[in-house]
Amino acid sequence: MIKADKIWIDGKLVAFDDAKVHVLTHALHYGVGVFEGIRAYKTADGRSAVFRLKEHVQRLYDSAHIVLMEIPVPPERLEQACVEVLKANKLDAGYLRPLAFFGAGAMGVGAGATNPVQVMVAAWPWGAYLSEEGLKKGIRAKVSSFTRMHVNVNMVRAKVSGQYVNSFLATREAAMAGYEEAILLDTEGYVAEGSGENIFIVKNGVLQTPPLSAPVLAGITRDSVLRIAKDLGVPVKEEKFTRDSMYLADELFMTGTAAEVTPVREVDNRRIGKGEPGPITKRIQDTYFKAVRGEEPRYREWLTPY
Ligand SMILES: Cc1[nH+]cc(COP(=O)(O)O)c(CN[C@@H](CCC(=O)O)C(=O)O)c1O
């Protein structure tokens, strides 16, 4: 059970157990909440830093804009709240969860649009999302029987709570079949992304990931990995690929704030490459972890120290 001392909600830090909402909260019924996942890490200088805080908070406001939601505080105030809640919980590293949502008031799908918008930020310690072993040795994944929604079904530039039912069904199906994560195809049958991650393959030294015109979240980790790959001199293609191209990949990994850079060693019971994290995956993973810990000066602008 996730636990912390304080949560920041509607402008105030309150005790964890007092951060409650009414059962007729619109978002609870209709899924119109927008959220972020942001990580803070201990850094080499003995302090801590939030990774790409500005970009994450901007994406939260973009998500709100897409669902016609006015978040009642400015982005700068929410950035401050993220740092406040890390400090209030004495977290020198951890995971931040900002969430803005239509609160209680009118019921009815559209009527809730006039309900007050609440906004909160929680923070807690969160280790390897897909296990430490997964980070080191790679995970086993399966292609889901659930399809990633069409770009005019899911708002793919937004992280909307209700859109995660698709991810929940996919990742639960994978887990119940003995796999660690699901990979979802798009409505045309091309590989889209994981239930909570973007996906990359490596073939003959070229790194490939679906373009942002695919039904994938514009991942901030994805963006960081593309920049790191370029700096490492790894050629990159942002092009769709098929599930069987994934089977034939030399390397495969997933990226996300929670998942970080997690290698995938097997998909649908087919070994990927040598069945272990490949050389390019390891170079990117190592550089990513150096970047989040402030050990790579060229990525310093990604860090908000606290
Ligand atoms: C569908 C999806 N695709 C890609 C990503 C990667 O985006 P980014 O974090 O900006 O690199 C995430 C983040 N998934 C978040 C939620 C995880 C959860 O279980 O909740 C996360 O990684 O924080 C997604 O939810």
Image (spheres, rainbow, N blue to C red):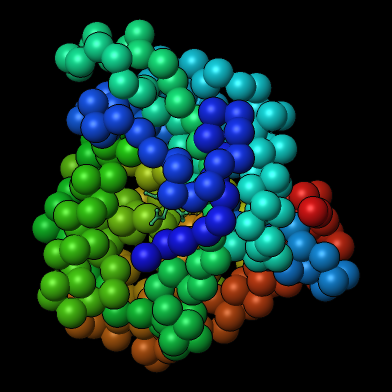
147 left or right, relative to 194: left
> So how many labels did they put on this image?
0
Picture quarter containing residue 153?
Answer: top left
Task: Classify the position of the N terminus by image quarter.
Answer: bottom left
Q: Is residue 160 visible?
A: no
Picture quarter containing residue 31?
Answer: top left
Coordinates of residue 152 in the picture (x, y in percent): 27, 27
Reply above or below: 6 against 68: below
Q: Residue at x 19, y 42 (%)?
A: 187
30 left or right, relative to 33: left
Q: Residue at x 85, y 71 (%)?
A: 46
10 left or right, relative to 115: right
* 149 vs 88, nearest the viewer: 88
Coordinates of residue 202 in the picture (x, y in percent): 47, 71
Q: Residue at x 12, y 58 (%)?
A: 145
Q: Residue at x 22, y 45 (%)?
A: 165
Coordinates of residue 301 in the picture (x, y in percent): 80, 49
Reply above or below: 20 against 276: above
Reply above or below: 43 against 99: below
